[in-house]
Amino acid sequence: NKFPHHTFQWEGIDGTRIFTHFPPVDTYNCSMKGSEIAHAASNFKDKGVARHSLAPTGWGDGGGGTTREMVAKAARLRNLEGSATVVWETPEEFFEKAQAEYPNAPVWVGELYLELHRATLTSQAKTKQGNRRSEHLLREAELWAATAAVRTGFAYPYEDLDRIWKTVLLHQFHDILPGSSIAWVHREARRTYERVAEELNAIIDAAQRALAGEGSAPLVFNSAPHTRDGVPAGGARTPAVLGETALEPRPDGGYVLDNGMLRVEIDARGLVVSAYDLAADRETVAPGQAANLLQLHPDFPNMWDAWDVDEFYRNTVTDLVDADEVAPGDDGVSVRVVRSFGASRVTQVLSLAPGEQRLGIDTEVDWHETEKFLKLAFPLDVHAERYASETQFGHFHRPTHTNTSWEAAKFEACNHRFVHVEEPGWGVAVVNDSTYGHDVTRTVRDGDSGTTTTVRVSLLRAPRFPDPETDQGVHRFRHALVPGAAIGDAVREGWRINLPERRVSGSQEVAPLVTVEQDAVVVTAVKLADDGSGDVVVRFHESRGGRSRVTLTAGFPFEDVTVTDLLERPLADAVGPERDGGRLRMPLRPFELVTLRLKRG
């Protein structure tokens, strides 16, 4: 353990601190042997100021828990000369004592990076996708069911949503979401995610039809927390027409996509050799490089096939540059690229939507490799010493360099919806709908001494253990390259790609149940309170890491507003928002997360 403390305060991105303890016994399967307890005592890095540590006891990983022998060993260590004293107590009792004796524990700010098990960010792609899509479907179901309940008397599905949330959270347990379970587990998980999607889509469809009414007018429902094509966040209306995209052949082969905001050149190999930001007069792709580059590595970790990827995998790489087909897509304004390698096949569709500064990349992989690692690379002409990676309710930064062993160890890292790199005044985002693992590296070019920052997203692996058929078959991924993106654009595009629009025929537009005026403030939940009271719960946060003052407007009458915790319990010391009729105003600190409960009138 390189970390300098076993007991400390961990500070999150919003400044919140949590009293934290890493058990110095260095195992979660302590059997109460004398040697283990002696190691815990000698290894405890804070023993000069703290006297208590935890020893998680029992056979872990489904092995049966604590045994009689372990209980008996602990009993002999209650008062044994020369040994640390062992007592049974609950975690709550331990933390009360530990915090009381060490109230000013040192503070660690930011990421607690585990230098192990990096492959769990990628193994079992369909399990990862099932989790991500279930999370967003649940958000949609809550939003539209709550809106329909307030507006039309729609029966809010309290019990169904509670059950589905618990099912999705259960599947985040190891080794399910990490992709390191046996094959049966992932087959079962895929079936469960399919049932969850079917149920949630049915709830969403019923709520949206109740809101839209009978009619034939084309309506677009926008579940994302930002206005999209003229459709407000949390509302529905006919979308605006935003222009056109032109597709032209390139003289040297390939095609050019141009929508007046971006001009994207795709060469005869199906690679993006230019993504030009027309407004900024700025090239995105590094000189002499190509983006949308699929790269294949051999993948033979030293231990734990599904769990680990080791740094030496980078020593050998095959660039997949040979294309079977590069041709216009079925819609006439996109480019279709087909590649074959090994026993596998990749089909990509590159598209540039009218009025959008975003190159969409839809990738279908029919994967039949073993012990291989597939990456998608974007070498960017950006000088960045750090990059932003999305996490829950915000983002944090990692260095692009490897000055120290701790930085070098982060050769594979986790993001949620986006990765963002930036020079002052201009940046680039890579957003995704279902991948988590990635790497970011930097090099200095020989020709112009410029810096190339390369973002690579991890698509697929093929370990043999514990599931020898890991990820064999067809997979579909959606990514987008967003040139000229500030951090707010990365946030918006990350939500957008995960919450695609839904089209419903109806007779009336749908106004949002709640509206937030500030783009920096993201509403992550609109729902009815779990207690069945009919109160509306709204959760939002500051998303850019700066100060903001939020103005929230409720589209329904309410009597009172209460600040609550994440479990919808009132926070006694919280300062509530100022009220002006149906408007609520309050300041927000960087990344501050707020939950409001509005009692309907």
Image (cartoon, rainbow, N blue to C red):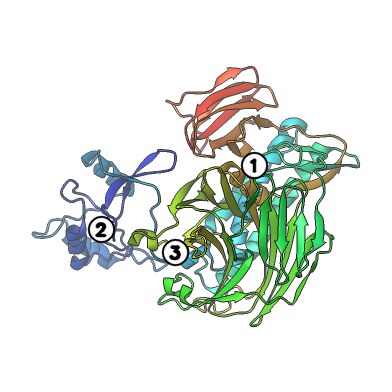
Whichever of labels 3 and 1 marks the residue nearer the N terminus, that label is: 1
Closer to viewer: mark 2 or mark 3: 3
The CA distance from mark 2 to mark 3 is 26 Å
Number of other residues with Cα within 10 Å of mark 2, as a class: few under 14, some 14 to 19, many 20 or more: many
- In this view of the protein, which residue sits in the foreground, 159 or 542? 542
Mark 3 residue type = Phe
Taking 213 as reference, is 42 left or right?
left
- In this view of the protein, which residue sits in the foreground, 175 or 286? 286
Q: Is residue 462 visible?
A: no
Residue situated furthest top in the rendering:
580
The CA distance from mark 2 to mark 1 is 43 Å
Image quadrant where one finds the N terminus: bottom left
Q: Tag 2's secondary structure?
A: loop
Q: Quadrant of residue 403?
A: bottom left
Q: Position of residue 138 (x, y in %)?
A: 64, 48
Q: Label 1: which residue?
A: 158
Q: Position of residue 124 (x, y in %)?
A: 57, 68
Q: Which mark identifies residue 24?
A: 2
- In this view of the protein, which residue sits in the foreground, 510 or 95? 510
Taking 259 as reference, is 381 left or right?
left
The CA distance from mark 3 to mark 1 is 43 Å
Q: Tag 1's secondary structure?
A: helix
Number of other residues with Cα within 10 Å of mark 1, as a class: few under 14, some 14 to 19, many 20 or more: some
Q: Which mark identifies residue 219?
A: none
Q: Label 3: which residue?
A: 411
Whichever of labels 2 and 3 marks the residue nearer the N terminus, that label is: 2
